[in-house]
Image: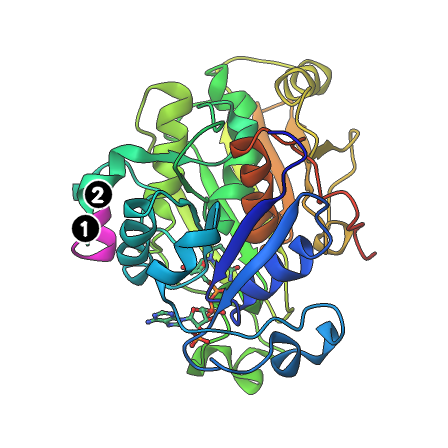
Amino acid sequence: MTSKQVSIAVIGATGYTGVELVRLLQEHPQVKITHLTSESFAGKKFSECFPAFSGRVDTTLSPLDVDKMAKDLDLAFLCVPHQEAAKTVKLFLDKKVKVIDLSADFRLNDVKTYEAWYGPHPHPELLEKAIYGMPELQLSNLKNAELIANPGCYPTACLLAIAPLAHHKLIHLDSLIFDAKSGVSGAGRKLALGSHFCEVNENFKAYGIGKHRHTPEINQGIKKLTGQLPSITFTPHLVPMTRGILATVYAQLKSSSTHQDLLKIYQDYYQKASFVRLRPEGNFPETREVRNSNFCDIGFHLDTQNQRLTVVSAIDNLIKGASGQAIQNMNLMFGLEETCGLLQTSPIP
Ligand SMILES: NC(=O)c1ccc[n+]([C@@H]2O[C@H](COP(=O)([O-])OP(=O)(O)OC[C@H]3O[C@@H](n4cnc5c(N)ncnc54)[C@H](OP(=O)(O)O)[C@@H]3O)[C@@H](O)[C@H]2O)c1
């Protein structure tokens, strides 16, 4: 890609991930925001809905009209619910517009697995076109992809925590426990009883135990890294904070090791990963240390007596867990610098 600007649309621009994309993209030097869509607020300026953007993003929100939009678009970011996303992906791909889909519709390669967790897939024939967009796992070349499936927020925190060890087959795959906690923005902006202030404030609960839809995505990621389907326990929790995910991962090592050995394995694996930061021994990340950034911070403790490992990873669910990772994927898709437009947002401590 040369100096040409990438002309983009955000579909579902009034949701949490959509707003976050707009916030980050309006400062991206190689992006032109061409269309922002909303069904509920069509006709209003984006800045009328979100006055923080007054004078910065005054684009008028329009309803989805793929025929009209496709004429001047390179890429559409889809920030709408699953199922709805798959239908829209098809419309854009038919018009030769590339897509980064933030929903779950194209993350799982196997249609049977998708349908077991999400219901009938509107366009299973497109699954083979989709590339899973977690660049740090180095599983596929994102350049020139037509359709990128942007990973889920929990799978991002969980897989990055464990990928180097899985890749080198150093852990027992039946020993993995993912204990993860998310801020409430993970549930989206739509109204739901479980996200009401009084339901969430001063409360802390596990939810979706044994049936959270990110389970097959974590399984698939580990299988891609190891060649083997793992047997995991994944328990998400809701924390009374707006944004952030902290994942605590427990794993049994296959053979004895030291903290130094493992740190070297993490350092080598993430050598080229601009957004993964490793903590020194005895130091563990907190969500506020990555808030408002595309970083995933990782620290771990090795119980040398039992060869049991505790890995802690922290991300901002709306950035590395969604919109920031989507921009990272866009950069790679269009041959731009991977970090372009993403390093200006420092964490808010
Ligand atoms: N929140 C997160 O942390 C996170 C992380 C990773 C991935 N995701 C995924 O990203 C997608 C967007 O999530 P979000 O948190 O931004 O959701 P959200 O805050 O609930 O926003 C969803 C957006 O989609 C539009 N929309 C809602 N229902 C629709 C429908 N039936 N058809 C078309 N448009 C509809 C809504 O706006 P209008 O009514 O104005 O059109 C809204 O702009 C979801 O698939 C979600 O699973 C979310």
Residue where numbered disc 2 is placed:
113
Q: At which x and y percent is residue 55?
A: 76, 73
Quadrant location of residue 146?
top left
Q: Is residue 224 visible?
A: yes
State the residue lying farthest toward the bottom: 198
Q: Residue at x 56, y 78 (%)?
A: 200
119 within the magenta span: yes
Q: At which x and y percent is residue 191?
A: 45, 81
Q: Which mark is residue 28?
A: none
Q: Residue at x 43, y 80 (%)?
A: 192
Whether residue 210 sits left or right of residue 30 in the image: it is left
| Stretch of the chain drawn in magenta | 114-120
Quadrant location of residue 207?
bottom left
Vertical side of 181 occupied by 247: above or below: above
Query: Residue 251 or 81: which is nearer the viewer?
Result: 81
Quadrant location of residue 125?
top left
Residue where numbered disc 1 is placed:
116
Q: Residues within 10 Å of mark 2 (few under 14, many from 20)?
A: some
Q: At which x and y percent is residue 323?
A: 57, 52
Which quarter of the rendering shows the C terminus? bottom right
Q: Is residue 170 visible?
A: no
Query: Residue 249 or 190: which is nearer the viewer?
Result: 190
Tell me, yes or no, whether the two marked residues, 2 and 1, touch with CB atoms within 8 Å.
yes
Q: Residue at x 22, y 37 (%)?
A: 110
Q: Residue at x 42, y 47 (%)?
A: 234
Q: At which x and y percent is residue 258?
A: 68, 16
